[in-house]
Image (spheres, rainbow, N blue to C red):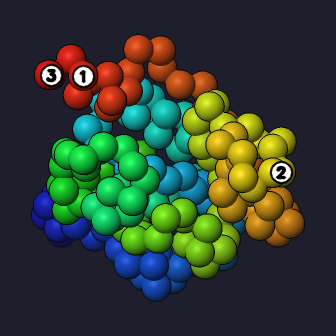
Amino acid sequence: MSRLEYLKAKIVDRERALKLVNGWKMKGEKIVFTNGCFDILHKGHVTYLAKAAEMGERLVVGLNSDASVKRQGKGENRPVNAEDGRLAVLAALGFVDLVVLFDADTPVELIEFIQPDVLVKGADYDPQERDTSSKKYIVGSDFVLQNGGTVEVVDLEDGFSTTAIIGRMK
């Protein structure tokens, strides 16, 4: 398999993701899940994803579709990079095992479908928050906890954000 084929094989739909995840679980591997837009990949993203990957044997990343990003109100010109490009860049990271595109406003259906062992978000979220209307609530955390998993947060890299990068470009 060429390197490009290997990269493309890491970009899967949810049904293929489930098949691979179930195989890894049968081998006793811990599945970590995180999600985001990952619009302009920067050091903060890479550090966050690397730390998330260290929490298990396999890292699955749910990526917001272009339409999903637009609905989040991140700005008229977002995403900057189209979903096919964002998928490829994430898949190119050695510690990312799978990238799954989702079109919903939240990844809750994907989380429930894949049933990860560990759900990870940035430290701007609170794993103890149970109020689903709170900005600190981690979507899917209740499901993961009820199914014996854990919910973790990763400290964010100070000074790195896509919004700040866009602001500096202007």
Left/right placement of residue 141 relative to residue 81 reads: right
Q: Residue at x 55, y 72 (%)?
A: 110
Q: Which quarter of the rendering shows the N terminus?
A: bottom left
- In the picture of the structure, the residue carrying the numbered disc 1 is 167
Left/right placement of residue 138 relative to residue 143 reads: left
The percent coordinates of residue 75 (x first, y second) are 30, 43
Residue at disc 3, secondary structure: helix
Q: Tell me the amino acid under the disc marked 2.
A: Arg
| Residue 93 visible in this rendered orientation of the protein | no
Contact between labelled residues 2 and 3, with CB atoms less than 8 Å apart: no
Distance from disc 1 to disc 2, alpha carbons, whole Å, reads 33 Å
Q: Tell me the amino acid under the disc marked 3.
A: Met
Mark carried by residue 169? 3
Distance from disc 1 to disc 3, alpha carbons, whole Å, reads 5 Å
Contact between labelled residues 3 and 1, with CB atoms less than 8 Å apart: yes
Question: Closer to the camera, 62 or 161?
Answer: 161
Q: Residue at x 39, y 59 (%)?
A: 71
Q: Tell me the amino acid under the disc marked 1.
A: Gly
The percent coordinates of residue 168 (x first, y second) are 21, 17
Instruction: Compare marks 3 and 2 and give the one earlier in the sequence.
Output: 2
Left/right placement of residue 87 relative to residue 124 reads: left
Judge whether 133 appears above or below 23 on screen: above
